[in-house]
Image (spheres, grey):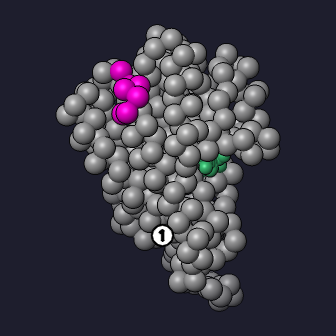
């Protein structure tokens, strides 16, 4: 059901690769809620992904940009203002990538060039985006910028690797820039910390199936889906969340506040009884 929450608002949405992407669901819902927006991703992702289908469906223009390139970001932001006819009201940063994860380099054997790339793509790109918009004075008063994060930024979760450090930096950038933007321009900057979700990026996380089963059992409301994340993101873009800024908001069915649940305890007890448990690496 649509509520016209974004009627007349203009946006930029990063990170829609295919119909499993969280950004894809955000774009569909933004369109349903009355927004106009541009879509962006890397040229490579555009070749392998399905962004053109989404653009058609949402009547949106696609502007290629590598989010680590200031020149690309300047072009994206200026062109978006031109196409949409004014300043931007909402931005979604839905970007994450680690070559260490892809190449299965573990945290105590990281490749440092890969590590720097992880930080650049998954965290510094958010600062570059915010700074580019700031210099171009591209975001409207009471505008809302959201980046997607994960709880491994604050708690250690096996296998999340250097992405944990990137998410910690991302959340910190959100607070630091959120202060400046709030003080000077009444613009909001937040991160949403989402449950593990089966997307292309999510599938790369070591042991994602076991992790999702665990968080499902631990969360009183169960894991949040990509679609539910999109619903919440719309609220964060809308005027209904005007005084929320510099926050990392958990959208995880309650997982972040749990220690042990009945469902997880039952599973753990059962595995203790198991005589042929697989070895742990
Ligand atoms: N899937 C999960 O379990 C989960 C949980 C919490 C948070 N998140 C976060 O949600 C966000 C979206 O991920 P997703 O799960 O929808 O996966 P996804 O793979 O669909 O999206 C990741 C996107 O990042 C884009 N990207 C990579 N490098 C880029 C660059 N240099 N410039 C611009 N774009 C680039 C990719 O092309 C892709 O579209 C990420 O920040 C991710 O860390 C995901």
Residue where numbered disc 1 is placed: 157
| Quadrant assignment for the C terminus | bottom right
Q: Position of residue 203 (x, y in %)?
A: 67, 58
Q: Which residues are magenta?
A: 134-140
In the image, residue 10 sits, relative to residue 177, either above or below, namely above
Instruction: Name the residue at the right extreme.
Output: 47
The picture quadrant where one finds residue 135 is top left
Find residue 231 and report its horizontal and vertical position in percent. Answer: 49, 30
Task: Judge whether 64 appears above or below 110 on screen.
Answer: above
The quarter in which the N terminus is drawn is: top right
Q: Residue at x 57, y 23 (%)?
A: 79
Q: Nearer the viewer, residue 268 or 71?
A: 71
Horizontal arrangement in the rendering, residue 245 relative to residue 19 (left or right): left
Residue visible at 63% across and 77% down in the picture: 105
In reply to whether residue 186 is colored magenta, the answer given is no
> What is the number of callouts on the image?
1
Residue at coordinates 46% horizontally, 54% vertically from top-left?
A: 123
**Left or right, 146 with reference to 77:** left
* Numbered disc 1: secondary structure: loop
Q: Please tell me which residue lies in front, 280 or 236.
A: 236
Name the residue rendered at 46%, 10% in the picture.
Answer: 8
């Amino acid at each position: 059901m649509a509520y016209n929450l974004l009627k007349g608002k203009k946006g930029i949405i990063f990170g829609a690769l295919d119909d499993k992407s969280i950004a894809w669901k955000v774009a569909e819902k933004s369109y349903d809620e009355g927004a106009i927006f541009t879509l962006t991703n890397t040229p490579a992702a555009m070749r392998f992904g399905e962004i053109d289908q989404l653009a058609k469906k949402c009547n949106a223009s696609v502007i290629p940009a590598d989010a680590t390139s200031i020149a690309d970001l300047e072009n994206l932001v200026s062109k978006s203002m031109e196409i949409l006819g004014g300043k931007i009201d909402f931005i979604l940063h839905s970007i994450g990538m680690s070559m260490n994860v892809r190449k299965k380099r573990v945290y105590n054997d990281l490749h440092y060039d890969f590590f720097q790339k992880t930080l650049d793509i998954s965290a510094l790109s958010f600062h570059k985006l915010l700074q580019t918009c700031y210099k171009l004075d591209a975001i409207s008063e009471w505008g809302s910028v959201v980046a997607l994060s994960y709880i491994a930024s604050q708690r250690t979760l096996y296998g999340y690797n250097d992405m944990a450090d990137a998410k910690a930096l991302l959340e910190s950038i959100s607070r630091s820039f959120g202060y400046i933007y709030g003080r000077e321009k009444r613009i909001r900057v937040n991160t949403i910390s989402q449950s593990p979700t089966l997307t292309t990026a999510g599938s790369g996380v070591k042991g994602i199936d076991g992790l999702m089963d665990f968080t499902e059992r631990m969360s009183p409301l169960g894991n949040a889906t990509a679609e539910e994340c999109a619903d919440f993101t719309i609220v964060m873009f809308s005027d209904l969340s005007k005084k929320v800024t510099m926050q990392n908001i958990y959208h995880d069915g309650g997982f972040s506040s749990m220690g042990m649940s009945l469902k997880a305890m039952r599973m753990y007890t059962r595995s203790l009884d198991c005589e042929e448990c697989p070895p742990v690496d």
